[in-house]
Structure formats: structure tokens, C-alpha cells
Image (cartoon, coloured by chain):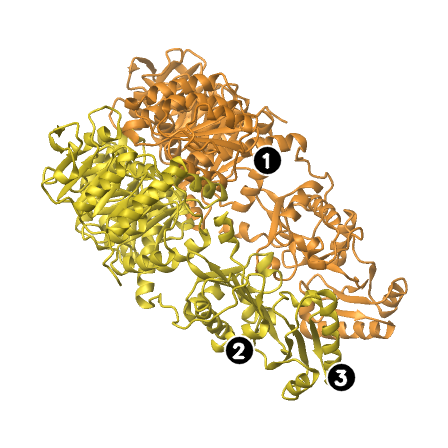
Chain colours: A orange, B yellow
Amino acid sequence: MDTSNIIDSRLINPHAIAIFGPSLKPNTVGNRLMNNIEKINPEVKVYCVNPKYDEVKGFPCYPSGLDIPDKIDVAVIAVPKDSVENSIRECIQKKVPYVILVSAGFAETGNEGLELQNKILKLCKENGIRVLGPNTLGVYNVKNNIPIIFTPIVREINSSIGLTTQGGAAGSMALLSATGEGVGIARLITTGNQIDINTLDIAEMYIEDDEIQIIASYMEAIPDGQKLKELGLRALEKQKPFIIYKSGRSEAGQKAAMSHTASLASSHTGFTLIAEKYGLTKVDSLDEMEDALKAFNARKRPKGNRVATLVVSGTQGVTNADHLVEAGLELAVLSDETRRKLREFVPSYLSIDNPVDISTHRDIFINCVEILEEAEEVDALFLQFNWSTEMGGDRYAQALVETYNRTSKPIIVITTGGEEFTGHIRKYLNENRIPSYNNVLSAVKSLYHLYNYEKRYSTRKQSPVTLKAPSMENKLPVSSDKSVTEPKVKDLLSQFDIPIPRGGVGKTLDEIFQIASGLTFPLVAKVVSPEIMHKSDVGGIVLPIENLEELKNAYETITQSVSRHSPSSKIEGYLIEELAQGPFLETIVGVKRDPLFGPIIMCGLGGIYVELLKDYSQRVAPITEEEALEMIKELKSFPLFNGYRGGSNYDVQALAELLSNISKLALTLGDDWSELEINPLIVLEKGKGVLALDGLITMSKSEYETVVSK
Amino acid sequence: MDTSNIIDSRLINPHAIAIFGPSLKPNTVGNRLMNNIEKINPEVKVYCVNPKYDEVKGFPCYPSGLDIPDKIDVAVIAVPKDSVENSIRECIQKKVPYVILVSAGFAETGNEGLELQNKILKLCKENGIRVLGPNTLGVYNVKNNIPIIFTPIVREINSSIGLTTQGGAAGSMALLSATGEGVGIARLITTGNQIDINTLDIAEMYIEDDEIQIIASYMEAIPDGQKLKELGLRALEKQKPFIIYKSGRSEAGQKAAMSHTASLASSHTGFTLIAEKYGLTKVDSLDEMEDALKAFNARKRPKGNRVATLVVSGTQGVTNADHLVEAGLELAVLSDETRRKLREFVPSYLSIDNPVDISTHRDIFINCVEILEEAEEVDALFLQFNWSTEMGGDRYAQALVETYNRTSKPIIVITTGGEEFTGHIRKYLNENRIPSYNNVLSAVKSLYHLYNYEKRYSTRKQSPVTLKAPSMENKLPVSSDKSVTEPKVKDLLSQFDIPIPRGGVGKTLDEIFQIASGLTFPLVAKVVSPEIMHKSDVGGIVLPIENLEELKNAYETITQSVSRHSPSSKIEGYLIEELAQGPFLETIVGVKRDPLFGPIIMCGLGGIYVELLKDYSQRVAPITEEEALEMIKELKSFPLFNGYRGGSNYDVQALAELLSNISKLALTLGDDWSELEINPLIVLEKGKGVLALDGLITMSKSEYETVVSK
């Protein structure tokens, strides 16, 4: 991989920074920034550029950037918009690698601003300067106390979370909230309009940053589908969980995103599939992101989904059991050995059946935790208590931390009883890396994220996914009002080992008879014309054809019918094929090209299953046969493949092969098509394979690109 | 309705109470209780009963309850278990109406305790004493400061919420949390093992209590299905939202509930359907219950689902839009008029398209809120801000309360920015009846509950549901290894106007020929035997029968085949019917008897639709034709009824009639059956009706009762 373009540590750990346009006037951008810079780590050299001052807040100030007697890593441009270009030119001369653009007056103000923005961007690109913003809050290295940012300064907590958000509010809310909860954020960068540096660039930097172990990002747009896949894999390789909250899922949300950061809409399905395949942790709200960060920041992950829950009331036992199971986790079945050990402490009228209920017996809390920690049948502990300081809560929390520090399993805690009684205990636990919540569903969901990450991590270690597309390329016609003819599609399918019926294309009756002589009746005849997408609508298909006389009739019927129903369509020939013989299952295999994420493969049973009952499954290309098998097994109608109610067993393996092959084929087709469909694709009995009876490639841009370009 | 048995106000507002077994020894039950009683409203007379003391915490103490010189409304029994009976006998003599049993040593300790419990219960019942507990925390009238309970005393907040929980922890957690949030609880009663008074009894009392406007309950078991329906309707009539969190949804949760409060398992599907039909607000966690209480306590409800959202950052706009739409709400489309008014305040670079984004312009906040409040196209306001005191948050919150108090639409607020900055503002707003959250999803879900309640309230006003079952009763055989024969089921169906094929039952070939002479070929012949549930498995069905000779053959074939495959089955006769002629759709109509909630009606298309694709819908009986139509329209496969892809239009109206009729039929069948199925029920073309081709009633207890009785 080319790493030459990765944002380097100078952005986050600069040796020296320059502020263009600092101000002593209250409520100006330049002043608000200086209030933070004033408190910056003294090891960072700060230089100001403003002809009006000699020094600002104790930092030296120069009339021009060129006067600065130092090498600058990061320049913040906060000057009035008419002076921006001049400041940038000084940065170019000073060979400044990173510019943070906080001046107002760019694209958000209209065409003139947009022109200026483009000019600045061009200037920077030509001179190798990377630009953050505009509409950014800036860069905050919390760990090293370097707040080149407009958020309030927060206390440092030992955290290994790198956060990057497109919208500034998402970043500042998460920073405040994570700090308040005792979780902390190590670095925060908000990218705003991201005319150059975007959230994925920052995520890439975090992946290479040894101080960052968890990456989180809020995005209103995915800047680059392919890069997202690459980063997903790289983060997984480095065992750095990568958590993404992508907003703009709904139409209303997309509309709002476009008006906010001029974000391009992107398909939610595509993103969901990418996350699943490339090991990203997808969350659906800012709160869920913060909850998940708590859990991942603990740096312990469960080996499986068997959870032991220890509670102080029966109600908690019942409700936790429900919530855990409904989230996809399991209640560990405690062994006799474990139960025996627990019973030494837990009075006989209380349950040790998981939920383990210690009721008011706080003194046995740590004993029980230790027994469950040691139990082989337990992958994670889920504790709930409500002990205020008065009830010894602080003391028990401290003992829990000690146990946690010398054991290996994740422990998740829910503290109830109200913020004023147990809030400080929750924060204490979080600061000591025991993820603690005041909301059961948040806790359960976060534990599930941990488990799911670990599961995907080990799956991908066993069967790595590939990013490589076939190097060949298949040329397709580019006119969007034409379709690729069935014989041509079938040629393509054949190249990728996808079985098609025996047959051929003839132009004259003689040629057709010639073809038929090599085939076994019954046959089917179909018109071939690039202008005709739906052959049966124009009487372009005749079947079954049992003999030569019927074949002749079919030839004449098609010719007349097409010329009547679609006089402008040119008939290129007649496709004559053997008719497939049952028993078989009719399926539909489709590919949609997502402009951001590439081809998405779909399969389902034919007829009403896909359209009405929405019983289909999807994956992003390319897929292995194993992934294809997973896809097929996900179908609710899957039992129909396997002798359901006395039916046949069908060739699932051949269908999986086909799906894998079609995913590779789709990657060779370039960018000018929107849909490829094999309908029907028949699946014969076990061992007899599949047959693509018809194939269509649609050339128009996808619906989704049309929406975007509006 | 019989109201003679309703718990009356003496339980919650006693004139005088007696404590049997108060103690001065720390950490005893009797002592912990007295620490609360010490602070009780001085208007309540308190008498203690304990031969050891003359007074306890300033209250007079007597050797025997009989010595108390006053009429007692509530007696708390906290004596050692061996003295409980004696205390109860004193209560009987004193004619005490309510006893709260807090002594330990009952059912939870084993058989001996259970016996004592039963003895006490019997004694109380015979003497008209109602018992709360054991395993109860007690009764807390927060509003009037009467804490006969083991939870910490909380400050009174002007609330109209009546809460009753089975588990004590659920009650005390909700009380603390609601108080902390500024919402408050007016009364709390936890019912524990509810050997007599249960959560529904308390809910019933709240419905009649003028100071209670919102009823909430946590249940591990539903004490009485029919009563739940009645209370649901009564609460709806009185416009008192009734919120229920029923735990034990999962198998693991049911197991835990059984070991906790010896709760019976109950069907989650049944409860969900009951909630939907009878206007209950079903929540799925304690947190969701507390969130919903906030919203309902505000006492303003939206007329529709069109929400205007006002935010202070673009990120909030995008994410709120997503969350609102995904929760089933809509973003109001703002009129030109409203937009014009907003634009007078909102700078041109900010969105007024809903989300309305005021960014940092706090000074226009109230102006915008007022404009949105007045807009006809808006049903509710959804505001998000993060202003700390320093940023004027308190001042804006106060202005918001003023606006809210003189306008009519619900306002929901999300305060972000961290507990220490905006927590007090959230609580202030809640105390002033503006539901405020720090979590977007909680806010969105709660607004949805408000909207859904209002929708159901108006639906039920237009088309009230009936609780009345037909007064007739149909006798069924009680032996569980027998089924009701098809002719008998069809007789029943006919009584309820459900069409069946023309035909009859003959025993001999002569009789069969006689029947056939009145019918039109083709026919079908089926064996009639109470021992045979699946006729086709034993060769008991022959079709199609085209003439008399084939009919004779069918008679012989069936006779031989049944005697070979099921020699012990007695053949009662042969059902001869006309064969249905297409086109038609095959459907399945089923009824399962839920032991708690009564018959549940199910319909779906035949074949694999119900079994494999789970495409069916359900309702609790009885249902009107309108409800039945809703059911049919819920099916994913519904388009198949309406000329899908050139198919026929089928008689949906007739199917709806049938569903309504079968729901009434099911209510006449008593309690000894588990399932009734019409499979197939064919739906003919529009105007041609339906035909029940086969019918079966299964007599065994339902699976679910089997589970419970384990």
C-alpha cells in the first residue's frame, strides 16, 4: 500500500504552530482560539502572525509568516477571507505541511466563496500543503495537551481513543461526554467541509498511531468506498476496533446532511454490508458510539457470548436475562463446580442459576465475581448494583478494580440508584477501564459490540477477505438507452464458468435450423436486439418448441410480433437454446453497482419471494464461495433447497460457486452500468449444477447516482 | 362492572396505621421501617405494637394490637414469622382492612413457609382482610408524604404518576430515577409475591384515583388476562395512559422470573396483541418506562406525527432527522408562511427547512419556538441544545417554560453537553413539565409513545372494541388424545356463517351414493374418525372423484388404507363433498387458545408462507371485520389478493367476515382445546366468497400451559 500520502504525526504533535489572524477582540474567531492556545503544552512553540501586535497572550507575533524564525508544522488561518490567499502563499514559502482553515466566507456563503475555496485548494495541492476544513473545529491532541481547537479544554484521561467527526458538534459532544464519563478521548479532529483532509484520512493516521488503539468516526458522507474497505481490513489486522456512526440513513437525514456539510448521499445498505464484511463496528447514534467506546476502551474482549450476570435484586436478574438474550448473547450455563463454589457464599434462598442474585449481601460480592471470573464456561461478566457511598459502593468498586486488573475477562457494570448516589462510582470504574453504564440496554449493546468484534476478528483471521479485483476488463456499450444483448451477457457469463443452456444465435431460418441440428428438443427461441430489454413484452420469446416445424413457426411469429410491437428495434438474430428440464428451483441473482462501494450481489428465490416477501440476501463483491453459502443460508426460503416437505435437494454448492463467479465478473465491467441480472437462474438437483436461462445488463446510471447528481 | 372489590383509598391515604413489630435494634426490618415512619405526615396517626416498648420514635407503643385506641386502616406486620398469625388475629378483631406483610419466612424459604403463607392468606380472606406482600417494599404515598415503605424517602415533585411494580427493586429504582430527573412519582406500591393484592389491583385503584393521571407498572407475570383487557379499556376511557413493562420475554428471563417471584410464564405475543388492542403502552425496559413517564407526565399530546426539530448544529439536524423518521414520526413540511417568519430571524446561510438550525444564535431561540408552535403543519416540537448556565442556558430554559405554559403543543427537549453543564437545566425543564432527555433515542421513542397513544385513543373512540363474548357455549369432547372430527368442526363453522363445501357424511356405500346424487361432480371423499388427526397420512382422502364408479373405488380405497395404516381407528363415516373450483387463493386461518388472554386469531397464505416465511398476522379475539381487514392488509403477501401480476382479485371482504366470525366461535369453546385450524381456507374471486375445505380442533392443552405446569 502507498503510505506516502498518509497524514503524519506533525498535524497532531507539531513542533511549532503558527496562528494567522489571532485577535485580542473578544468573540472573534482569532480570540476564541487564542484562549485555548494560551493553555497549550509549553513544549509546542507558538507563533502569531498579525501586523497589529508584537505579542499575543505571551506568544511572539510577526507582521508576516515569513518573519517566523522557525519551521512550522501546522498553520491556523483565521484571517479575513480576502487575506487567506496571502497567508497561504506565506505558508507555501515556509513549506508548512498542514493548514487548518478556520476563516469564514467559503462555499457556505455562495458562489463567490466557492470560487475562492477552489482557488485556495488548488494552490495548496500544487504546493503539497494538506488542508483541514473549512468549517472545522480544529485539531485537539488531548493526551499531550495541544488544543488547536474551538471546543472547551478538557482534563486528560488515560484513553487510547482517536475520534474524528465530520460535524463539529458531534466531536465536541462526544469529547465532553466521554470526559464526563471517565472514558476520555486521546485525540479529536473534526473535518468540517473536508475539501482536502477527510475523516478517512484521519482514521488512516490513527491506524498508524501507536498511542491510538480504538478509532471512532462520525460521518455524514463516506469519502471513499474503496479506502473504507482498505482501512477496515488494516484496522482489523492491527486489532484496532474502528467504530463508525454514519448519519443520513433516512431520506430526511440525507436532505439535512446535504444542506449541512454538502455531503453526498450514500447507500445505507452498501455501508452496512461493508461494515459487516470488513470488520467495522457500525453504530446508529452518537450515544451508541459513546457507549461502545466505553466498552472497547477497556481493552478486554470476550472469547464467546456466554455471559454470567450477578445482580442485587430479582428484578435485575429477570430483566438482564431478557436484555442479554435479546441482544444476541447467551446466559452461561454454570457448571456444578461453579455452583458449588458460589453456594459457599450465597444463601440457599437466593438463585445461583445465572442470574446470580446476592440481594443485600454486599460482603460476598467480590467472592462471587472471582468465582465467575475463574469459571471456564463464562466469557464475560455483567454486574448490576446500586450501592451508594453510604452503602460501601466506593469500597466495593475499588475491590472490583483490583480483581479486574489481575484477571482477563471483560466485566461490564450497570450502576443504578440515581446519578447523585452512584454516578461517581460509575465514572471511577470507567476511569479504571471497567465499562460502566446507568442504562441496561446501552450496556448490553456495548457488550454485544465487543463480542461481535472478536467474532469477526477471528473469522477474518481464518478466512481473510480479498480486495483484489480481477485485472481484466470487459468493455460494455456506453449508451444508456441500450442494453447488452442476452447472447453477449451469456458470453460474459461463460467466461466466468457460469453454465448457460446449449444453443446459438442464427440470423436466417437456415442458420437456425443448422443450430437446432446440434441440439435436443424441446427448444426455446428468443429475439436478439439491443433495443429490446423485455423480450416477452414484444412477443420475442416462443417456447416450448418440439420439432423443426414448430421452430419455423416460432421464427416467423417472433419476426412479425417484434416488428408489430417494436417496429424501430433492429433484430440482430434469434437465440435458439435447449429448454431446461426439471425438477429445478427458480432463483434470481442480481448485481447492483453502488457508485461508492462497487457491485452488490443479491440472491433469492424467483417469483414473489424477492419482490413481495423481500426474502433475499446481499454482499459486496468480491465474495468467496463460503460467503456465498452464508448468503444462501440466510434466506428464509432456504429449506426449499433441502428436500422441504418431500421436495428435491437442489445444488446449493453450484449456486454458491455461481455467486462467487458473478461477483468477480461484476468487478470487470467498469463504471457505466447499473444492474446485472440473471433471471431466472435455475438450480437443478444436487450434483446437476445451475443454468442461467436469461441475463441482462442495464447501462443507465444507477438510481442512486441520479439522486446524488440532482 | 363490579367495583366492590377495588382497593380503596385507605391503603394509600390511611387515617391511622399500626406497626406490628417495630424495633430499636439497627438493621432489623422493624427498625428500618421506623426510620421512614418517623418522617411521616403528622396527620397520619401511627401506633406501634411491641410488648417491649412504651413508645418508638415518639409514637405510642402497645403490648397488643387490641390495645390501640383507634380505628386502623393499614397494619404493617414485621414480627417474627411465628407471631404473624397472632398479629393477624388481632387485625381481624380490630377490623383492619389492609395488611402489609413484611415479615420474612414465607414461601421463599420452602414448604413449611409456604404452608404458613397459605394459612395466613386463608385467614385473611375469610375475614375480608386484603394482604399486600410478602416480599413487598410497601406503600409510598409520595404526594402526601406517607412512606410505609423500605425505599429512601424522596422529595415530593408535582407528579400525577401512579407506579406499581411486582419486583421491589424496579419500584425503588424508578422512584429514585424519576425523582432525580425532576419527574417524580405520586404513589408507589410494590406487590412482591402478590399472594392477594397484585399489580392489576393497584392499577385499578389508580384508575379510580383522581390524583393519578398516568399509571405505570412493572410485571413479571400478568395476574389476570381478562382483567388486563378491562383495565386497558377503562384507562383509555378515562384518558389515563397505562404503561406496562412486562419482563420474562425470553426463556432465560422466564426462568429467572419463576425463581424470583414464582411468576407464571405468559405469552409475549399475547401480551403484545393485548397492548395494541386495548390501548396499553408497552415498553421493553425500565429505562424506556422512565423515559415514557417523563413524556406522559407533561400532559400534552400531539394530534399527529408531524414533528418540527430545532437544533443548534448541523450534526444534530441530520441525526435527529434520521432518528425521528426511523421511529415512525415525520418531519413536518414547513409552509411558505412559516418559513418566511423563520427567515426574519434565522440568517440566510442556516437551514429553515426542518431541521431548523439556529447554530450559535441563541437570542432567536424563543422566537423560532413560537413560530413553530403556531404553525398548523406542526404537531410537536423537538428541540436540542447544549447551553450551560454560562451560555445563558437557565435563562433560555425559563423562557421556554413560559412559552410552553401558554401554548398547547408538546415540546420535547434534548440537552447535550454533559451532565455537569446542562443536567440541572434538563431537570428544571422536567419539573416544569417539558420532557427533557440527554439521549436522543430516548426522546424520540417517548415522543412516539405519546403519538401512538393519541392515535389509539382516537381510533378506539371511533371504533370501540368489545369485550363481550357470545353467551352460547359449544361442548367439545374433553379427551386430549382425540380430535374433533371434520364434520363436527364444519357444523360449528356453519353455525357461525362460515361457508363450507356442499356435502354430507354417509356410513354405507348406499348412503354415500344417496349424498352424491344431490351434488355435482367432481367430488372428494374423506374418512371421518376422531382418532385420525391427519387424514392424508393414512390414505384417508381421495380426490378428484369424477363419477359414481370412482366414488365406489374411493370408498373401498379409504376403508382398506385406513384399516391398514391405522387399524385401531374407528371409522365413523365418509365425508363426501363437492370439490372446489378455481381460481382461488389458499389461506390458513388458525386460532390458538392462550390460557391467559384467550383465543388468538392468525391468518396467512397457505403453503410455505406461514411456516417458512412467517408471513402471518395475529389478533386477540373477538375481532371486528375492520380489525380483520387490517390483519389481512398487514400480510406481506397481501398484493396477491389484488390482481398481482395479472392475477385475479380475491374476496378479501369475505375473508375478513370469516375471521371475525371465527373469533366469535372460538370464544364459545371453553378451555379444553388448544388449537382450531381451517386449512386450507380458500378465498375465491371477488364476490364469490370463501370456503373452509377442512377444519380441525385439537383438544390437548396448549404447549404453553405444559411449559408452565412443569
Q: Which mark sits nearer the N-terminus, 3 or 2?
A: 2
Task: Bin the neighbour count of mark 3 within 10 Å (Cα to Cα): few under 14, some 14-19, many 20 and up.
Answer: few
Total labels drawn = 3
How far is mark 1 from mark 2, CA to CA?
Answer: 57 Å
Of the two numbered discs 3 and 1 in the rendering, the one whose residue sits closer to the viewer: 3
Q: Nearer the viewer, residue A549 or B200?
A: B200
Q: Give residue B50's position: percent from left, percent from top.
A: 18, 31
Q: Give residue B273's position: percent from left, percent from top.
A: 42, 57
Q: What kind of residue is marked 1?
A: Tyr
Question: Which residue was labeled with disc 1?
Answer: A278
Say which mark, if any, is on residue B499: 2
Say which mark, if any, is on residue B701: none
Q: Secondary structure at mark 1?
A: helix
For residue A443, what is the image quadrant?
A: top left
Q: Give residue B678's position: percent from left, percent from top.
A: 56, 68
Badge 3 sits on which subunit? B
In the rendered view, does A32 fall on the left or right side of A540?
Answer: left
Question: Which residue was labeled with disc 3?
Answer: B549
Badge 2 sits on which subunit? B
Task: Bin the neighbour count of mark 1 within 10 Å (Cα to Cα): few under 14, some 14-19, many 20 and up.
Answer: many
